[in-house]
Image (cartoon, helix red, strand yellow):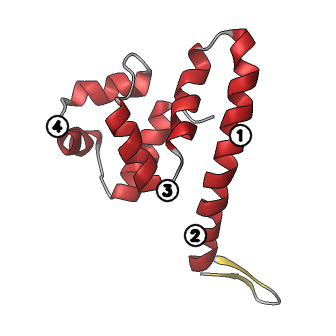
Amino acid sequence: MKTASQWLDMFKKYSRIRSDYALAAHWGVCQSRISQYRKGRLKLPLAFVLEIAETLDRDPLEIIVSLAYPKARERDKAGLKDVYFRVALRGITNEMAANSRAYGWRPGRGWKR
């Protein structure tokens, strides 16, 4: 499962935001908040999670569950894994389909670029 830092990096990549400073300006927060989100000291606000999900074309539930998993009780982790992988499968499938349009395997010719 992805960490908050990984989700933020993916969001920055897809949004063409180059730094945490620019990300902080985009969301109207101070740069130290971005650092605290990355380290897990602060939870990402729901509005930010929804924006990340929309930008990455992912289900917001995938992000919410992946961020909640590390702090969940042991007896709840199995259920969270089931939900995460069911939802993540759809997001990964969409991402792979989008990537295959630009790059992909061509029979007899190898990888096209």
Which label's residue is closer to the chain start, 1 or 2? 1
Which residue is farthest right?
Answer: 108
Specify whether 94 is left or right of 9: right
Image quadrant of residue 72?
A: top right
Q: Alpha carbon of mark 3 to alpha carbon of mark 1: how far?
A: 16 Å
Q: Secondary structure at mark 1?
A: helix
Image quadrant of residue 8?
A: top left
Q: Are marks 1 and 4 in contact (CB under 8 Å)?
A: no
Q: Alpha carbon of mark 3 to alpha carbon of mark 2: how far?
A: 10 Å
Which label's residue is closer to the chain start, 4 or 3? 4
Q: Quadrant of the C terminus?
A: bottom right
Which of pointers 1 and 4 indicates the residue nearer the eye? 1
- Look at the picture and state if 30 lies above or below 97: above
Image quadrant of residue 74?
A: top right
Q: Which mark is residue 85?
A: 1
Which of pointers 3 and 2 indicates the residue nearer the eye? 3
Which label's residue is closer to the chain start, 3 or 2? 3
Q: Quadrant of the N terminus?
A: top right
- Where's residue 104, x and y in %? 68, 77
- Where's residue 106, x and y in %? 75, 85
Would you name the residue on which mark 4 appears? 28
Would you name the residue on which mark 2 appears? 98
Amino acid type at mark 3:
Asp
Q: Alpha carbon of mark 4 to alpha carbon of mark 3: how far?
A: 23 Å
Q: Alpha carbon of mark 4 to alpha carbon of mark 2: how far?
A: 31 Å
Q: Are marks 3 and 2 in contact (CB under 8 Å)?
A: yes
Q: Secondary structure at mark 2?
A: helix
Which of pointers 1 and 2 indicates the residue nearer the eye? 1
Would you name the residue on which mark 3 appears? 57
